Amino acid sequence: MTERIRQEVNKRLQDSSDGVDMEAPVRVVSSETVYRGAIFHIDDRELALAKTDGGEVSVRRQILVHPQAVVMLVHDEVQDKYLLEREYRVGPDKFTYGFPAGLMEDGEKPEISALRELQEETGVTPKDRHSVRIERVGDFYSSGGMTNELAHIFVIHLADWKQEPRHFDKDEHVQSTWVTWEELTGIGVQAADSTIAIQHEEIRRLRSQLASRQ
C-alpha cells in the first residue's frame, strides 16, 4: 500500500517538474571539507541533478556531516514518571530541557546505543532484559536542508531498574531527575526530537486511558 501511494504521488509531483528528474540519482561532482570539528565536519559540494531531457543542472550545497544519534524518553512504569535532563545547548544559547541522547558508535544498533547512552548519562540501567520495553518512535533528520544527522527516537519503558555510576565526557555537564507527566509536558521542552517523543507517548497514554474505560 505504502509503495503504491508513493508511486502515485511521485508521478503527480514529477508532472510539475521544471525539467529536473527527481527519480534519478544525484551525482556528486566535487566535495571539499571546509571545516572539521570534534564531532562533525562541513563539506562544500557541487552536485549534478539529472534533467528529463538527458542533460544535467549543477547546484552547490554545504552539508554538516554528523554521526547518527539516539534520543530516549524514559518511562518508569511503576512510578509513572519520566526522566528529564537539563544542559547547555549552544544553538539556542541557554540551558534547555531534554532527554537522554547521544551519538551512535560505528556498527552499533540504535537500541543498543540507546541503552548505553542512557547508562552513561544518567546511570539508569534496566535490572534485566525482562524489565525493559523499547518502543521505536521513528527515525528523523534534524534538518534535511543542511545536515545528514539522523536521530533514532525511542520511548523506553522500565518495569524495574538500578542506578549505576554516570560517565560523562570531560566537557559534558548534565542534570537529570524524574518528573510526572504533568511536569514533563508543562516544563517547556523545545527540542524537536524530544517533542516528537512526547507526542508519541501522549498518544499511547490516551489510548491506554480509553482502553481502561471500556
Image: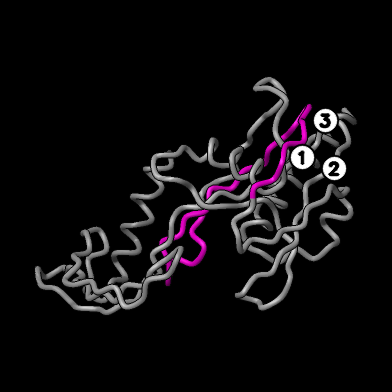
Report if the CB atoms under discs 3 and 1 are less than 8 Å apart: no
Q: Is residue 179 above or below residue 20?
A: above
Question: Which residue is identified by label 1?
Answer: 75
What residue is shown with label 2? 81
Q: Horizontal placement of 62 versus 105: left or right?
A: left
Magenta-highlighted residues: 140-167
For the view shown, which residue lies furthest in the front direction? 170
Instruction: Farthest residue to the top: give it.
Output: 130
Residue 35 percent across, percent down from the top left: 36, 76
* Left or right relative to 27: residue 168: right
Tell me how far mark 3 sits from mark 1, CA to CA. 20 Å
Q: Earlier in the sequence, mark 2 or mark 1?
A: 1
Label 3 or label 1, whichever lies nearer to me, is 1
Amino acid at pointer 1? His
Q: Name the residue carrying label 3.
A: 211
Q: Earlier in the sequence, mark 3 or mark 1?
A: 1
Q: Give the residue displayed 72% in from the left and 34% down from the top.
A: 157
Residue 204 on image: x %, y %: 74, 40
Alpha carbon separation for disc pair 2 and 1: 6 Å
Q: Is residue 118 magenta?
A: no
Q: Amino acid at mark 3?
A: Ala
Q: Secondary structure at mark 1?
A: strand
Q: Tell me, yes or no, whether the two marked residues, 2 and 1, touch with CB atoms within 8 Å.
A: yes
Front residue (pair 47, 123): 123
Residue 160 on image: x %, y %: 78, 27
Q: Position of residue 96 (x, y in %)?
A: 73, 67
